[in-house]
Image (tube, grey):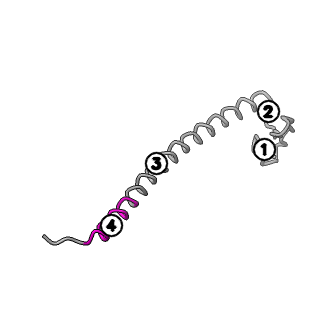
Amino acid sequence: MKKITEEQLKTIQDQQSKLQAAFIDIGFIESRKHEALHIQMRAAEALETTKKELEKEYGQVNIDLTDGSYTLIEKNESASTLEKV
């Protein structure tokens, strides 16, 4: 039976091992990405719910997120309900 050299075998085994480790890492990263996207979606939904609750209580306002102060939105103003400062 013919064989490649021990050095060649070691090289290809190391390369294969690195490739498999990369696939495992990519799978882990994709899993974390999927989880993060779900967290982001739930946070966005919660924010929209809170915006609607605040709009019922205060009307259409711009809220300063640094101190909680707010100003009424004029009818012709096209700003969002919450404004980041």
Estimate how packed mark 4 is, as few (under 14), some (14 to 19) or many (20 or more) residues with alpha carbons within 10 Å.
Answer: few
Mark 3 and mark 1 lie on one chain; the one further toward the N terminus is: 3
Q: Identity of the amino acid at label 4?
A: Ile
Res. 82 image quadrant: top right
User: Which mark is drawn over residue 5?
Assistant: none
Q: Main secondary structure of the magenta part?
A: helix
Mark 4 and mark 2 lie on one chain; the one further toward the N terminus is: 4
Between marks 4 and 2, how big is the CA–CA gap?
A: 68 Å
Q: Identity of the amino acid at label 2?
A: Gly
User: Which mark is drawn over residue 28?
Assistant: 3
Residue annotated with mark 2: 59
Between marks 2 and 1, how big is the CA–CA gap?
A: 14 Å
User: Which callout, 3 or 4, points to the residue nearer the camera?
Assistant: 4
Between marks 4 and 1, how big is the CA–CA gap?
A: 57 Å
User: Which callout, 2 or 1, points to the residue nearer the camera?
Assistant: 1
Estimate how packed mark 1 is, as few (under 14), some (14 to 19) or many (20 or more) residues with alpha carbons within 10 Å.
Answer: few
Q: Identity of the amino acid at label 1?
A: Glu
Question: Residue at horizontal 78%, vertical 47%?
Answer: 79
Question: Residue at horizontal 30%, vertical 71%?
Answer: 8
